[in-house]
Image: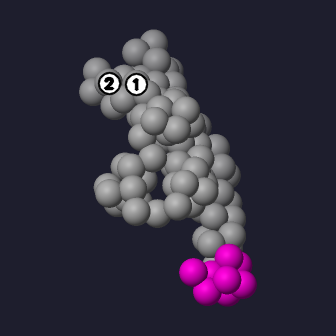
Amino acid sequence: MFLLIIIGLLLIIIGIQLRRGKWYGIVAGNNFKDKPIEIQKKGALGASSITLLVGSFLIIIYILDFYGIQTRFLTLPVFVIVIPYSFFSIYKYLKHFIKYGE
């Protein structure tokens, strides 16, 4: 269970660094920074939001489990938040792809 807090903290650190613009190169395999900076910023913003959300969720689960609180009730917020966010992201990408062909 201690691994949850370690992974959660690492994800939060990655999310913060992506928001600050330090680690654009790790988003979507952009290792050689061959994409324009605007595309890197958009990808990093989306990735940082997801990593911050998942990292904080893992830490919350660890804290609740540490104090012996049942975590079954957390599955509903995950489905309510993550699934609509995923569909919105897919819709947004498809809309951009249809409009610009990229």
Q: Secondary structure at mark 2?
A: helix
The CA span between labels 1 and 2 is 5 Å
Could you tell whether 38 is left or right of 68 in the image?
Answer: right
For the residue carrying disc 1, how many other residues have a C-alpha within 10 Å: few (<14), some (14-19), or many (20+)? some
Would residue 68 be seen by someone viewing this image from the given angle?
A: no
Q: Secondary structure at mark 1?
A: helix
User: How far across and how far down the image is residue 41, in percent?
Assistant: 58, 50
User: How far across and how far down the image is residue 27, in percent?
Assistant: 42, 53
User: How far across and how far down the image is residue 13, in percent?
Assistant: 43, 28
Residue identified by numbered label 1: 9
User: How far across and how far down the image is residue 66, in percent?
Assistant: 40, 15
Residue identified by numbered label 2: 6
Please provide the residue range marked out in magenta: 95-102
For the residue carrying disc 2, how many other residues have a C-alpha within 10 Å: few (<14), some (14-19), or many (20+)? some
Q: Is residue 94 magenta?
A: no
Numbered-mark total? 2
Residue under the point 60% across and 57% down: 38
In this rendering, the answer to whether 17 lies above or below 78 is: above
- Amino acid type assigned to the residue bearing label 2 in the image: Ile
User: 28 or 55, which lies in front?
Assistant: 28
Would residue 32 be seen by someone viewing this image from the given angle?
A: yes
- Residue most toward the top? 67
Do the residues bearing badges 1 and 2 touch, measured as CB atoms within 8 Å? yes
- Amino acid type assigned to the residue bearing label 1 in the image: Leu
Quarter of the picture holding the N terminus: top left
Could you tell whether 40 is left or right of 76 in the image?
Answer: left
In this rendering, the answer to whether 32 lies above or below 62 is: below
